[in-house]
Amino acid sequence: MSIYLDSSATTAPRPEVIELVTEILTSGWGNPSSLHSWGERGAMALEKARWQVADLINASSPNSIIFTSGGTESDNLAIFGITSLCNTPQHIIISSVEHSAIERPVQFLEKQGWHITRLPVNREGRVNPHDLQKALLPNTVLVSIIYGQSEVGTIQPIKKLVEVTKKHSQALFHTDAVQMVGRLPVDVEVLQVDLLSLSGHKFYGIQGSGALYVKQGVKLNSLLYGGGQENNLRSGTQGIPAIASLGLASSLAQKDMESEAMRLRELKNYFIELILTKCPYLTLTGDLFHRLPHHASFLINLPQEGITGRKIVRDLSLKGIGISAGSACSSGKTLPSPVLLAMGYSEKEAIKGIRFSFDRNTTKSDLDFTINTLTILLDREIGGEN
Ligand SMILES: Cc1ncc(COP(=O)(O)O)c(C=O)c1O
């Protein structure tokens, strides 16, 4: 048995994507900056992908798309690209449930003297726009709020948060939309964000592909200096196979987004309802309604300290099922998930999170099998048999 339920971590590239990448690696590998025909072919693939990504997020100009190596780099470029324009440390606002690709760069800035506000979230992981309004200061240069939370699936009211930011400050607005783009419609014109991060391997492109959307007119510094590629914002020869995979994945996502989001939402609702009935000691984490369509996450409400999310991940893996846990491990000790702590869970609870995330290959019978396996496993744990 082999059931992969970890698509929030990464997805298997679509067959069409593998075909395209193979073709590029075989005959389209020219450096897009070269002037000969090999280079021209690379440049054509690059610009096609830029249009495809721009189209997916409704960016008015393909020049707004800066290709990067993925979500982490896009987030870092947004944070450091903006803050490095300031001569002295200023103020940034993020949420308390950001991915580490935002939280860690901001921690670095904090050490350099920047003032950071981490907005609180409610028990479902949502930011309150009033809290953002209160936190804005005259020297706030950037607000960065995650769009779809990777660990608990909660979707933030980004449009409203941008409105509040623009109404009450001069700050730029960035969103980490890595879990949203390719899964649900994301329209940068409607949202009015200044910067937006996305990552190709989260929606069937290949790993090492990503982009930062930069609204026309928004200025930022590059993190890499060299040949001046990507409009001087990301020097280095572009990785055409990865970028083309992102382009094609964007077009394909756009084509079946509505039907696939609906199919996944139905699967997710079915899964949540059934698992909570069969395993009454699980509770849903995150927001039931404002939720990524492919995402179901839970807390294991059992007092036994040994029953951690990581243990369940390992046990299910032995049965051929791939899921993930929010908590990390340091020196052999399971650390509580910062996201669950921010949502008000205790340290003891915050090591007991598990996440199931579905993709285009997930079927109802995969979910039935997973629920049965998990039920048997947890019942055994409660009974003390291992
Ligand atoms: C919300 C979010 N942001 C950023 C990242 C990092 O993206 P990448 O793996 O492409 O660097 C991830 C990956 O899990 C993510 O879920």
Image (spheres, grey):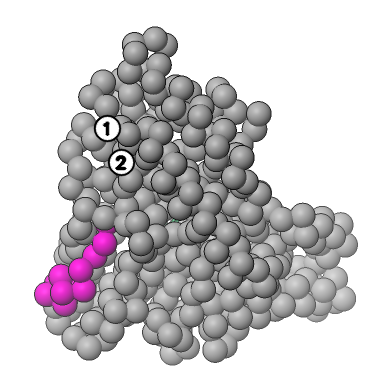
Residue 364 showing in the rendered view:
yes
Label 2 sits on residue: 283
- Residue 86 position, x and y percent, is 27, 76
Figure check: 242 above or below 1: below
Badge 2 amino acid: Thr
Foreground pick, 200 / 1: 1
Q: In this view, does 103 lie to the left or right of 203?
A: left
- Residue 19 position, x and y percent, is 81, 57
**Mark 1 packing: few (<14 Cα in 10 Å), some, or many (20+)?**
some
Sequence order check, earlier mark of 2 and 1: 2
Tell me what residue is drawn at x 34 percent, y 11 percent: 384
Tell me which segment is drawn in magenta. Answer: 125-136
Residue furthest toward the left?
A: 134
| CB atoms of marks 2 and 1 within 8 Å | yes
Distance from label 2 to label 1 (Cα)? 7 Å
**Label 2 element class:** strand
Label 1 sits on residue: 301
- Residue 201 position, x and y percent, is 59, 55
